[in-house]
Image: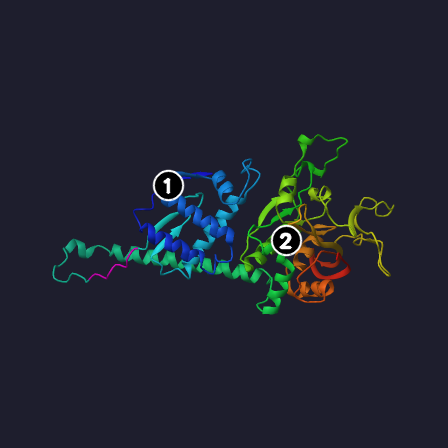
Amino acid sequence: MSVTGVSTLTGPKRSESLQQIEKLAASNLLHGSESLCKLLRYLATQALDHPGVSVKEYQIAVDVFGRSDSFDPRQDSTVRVQAGRLRAKLAEYYAAAGVDDQVIVELPRGSYALLFHSRPPSSPAQEPDTERPLPEKAKEQPPYGWIAAVGALVVLLALALTSLGLMLIRTTSSRPVAATRAEDIAALRGFWKYFIDTPEDPWVVFSNAEFVGRPETGMRYFDTARDSKNDILDHYTGVGEVLGIHELDHLFTIFNHGLRVKRGHLLSLDDAKQNDVIFIGSPSENLPLREIPSTREFVFKRSDTPVRSGDLVISNVHPKDSEPFVYYSAQRIPLVDDYSIVALVPGLSPTHWALILAGTTTIGTQAAVEFVCRAHSVEELLNQITGKPAGPVIPFEAVLRVKVTGGVPVHTEIAALRVNR
């Protein structure tokens, strides 16, 4: 995407604009996000130094986010995602803390050209002209100015009520990710430290299985023996994966940190080497997990028993006393239970990590994500891993037992745990 920059010098002075940029970078909304502050300063410099010159997505990717010369915006949405986050943060700032700021900074939707505006001064109220009588015809006309003003106020009130309603819906329809207690925040930060103590946003890679066929005529998994790769449909995912991404987005908002989302089919080995990665979904559908280092103690596989042949199960490679060799959900519909894996393992490079959140079904995947986004369950997990409710976490693998009611995970507990010291 490239957009011609709009001249900003007709508004505030350059020094005032730069002061406002630093004020924004130091604000509570942006101070904790190095990547967003870097993007904001870069776009400001481009807009002020090169008014009227287009800013290309490729240029931002290389200069700001350190992408290589082979950057392909069709495969990597980093710039678009970060620009969207910055746009939202600016709007949030000027709706609250910056409501009285004299310099307004805006990133228009669909644009990388930062705009600067001077806040218009308030117009003094005009005294009514009582000395000159109105013509008779004017007296008979309805007061259109007042009608327009009242109409505008009605529209603004309606928009305000709509926004308030949407916020209430969002608040009441989403269960809280974390309480406000300092202990809760400490536990969550202790578990997620490897993914939030870095300037780069981690990749969230969700499963998208390879299907053939069409929804209206029937779909099935791709079969290498009889299907052509040209017939693959790889743009479907599960309900649990979608809700899981929502949970993570909410949690990382609390951390004032961003996420980059990508479907598994598009993840390259270079992506996995150069980034921290959160995998949502099992290797049966999140295919990169078949090619990179993954779990060793608890492993997804297809059952070869006559009763459950072909079912996805979790194999317990080195079972301890009283532990089963295999974890699998009850064979009934509707689903009443499931099993999931939660595991933190080293990434493909020594400086990066991979977190695996996956169930034998999409509901189990949802439960795994929710488990690591809730303070009380994270405290329990950290206690078993490190002996401390606030961590910091070390590499581990865990199996979760999930109770399901009405297609929703209602209770999740740790069934087995291995700590890789």
| Residue at position x 35%, y 55% in the image | 103
As drawn, is 179 to the left or to the right of 346?
left
Q: Residue 231, located in which quarter of the rendered image?
A: top right
Q: Name the residue nearer the viewer: 394 or 321.
A: 394
The residue carrying pointer 2 sits among few (fewer than 14), some (14 to 19) or many (20 or more) residues within 10 Å by Cα, namely many
Q: Which residue is mark 1?
A: 50
Name the kind of residue labelled 1 in the image.
His
How is the protein colored in the picture? rainbow
State the residue position of label 2: 244
Where residue 351 appears, x then y in whole percent? 64, 50
Magenta residues? 120-126
Residue 287: percent from left, percent from top: 70, 42
Label whose residue precedes the other's in the sequence (1 or 2): 1
Q: Residue at x 41, y 55 (%)?
A: 22
Tell me, yes or no, whether the two marked residues, 1 and 2, touch with CB atoms within 8 Å.
no
Disc 1 crowd rating (10 Å Cα; few below 14, some 14-19, many 20+) is some
- Residue 317 location, x and y as percent? 83, 52
Q: Is residue 311 visible?
A: no
Residue 83 vs residue 27, the one in the foreground: 27
The reply to whether residue 342 is visible in this rendering is: yes
- Foreground: 281 or 21? 21
Q: Is residue 272 above or below residue 381?
A: above
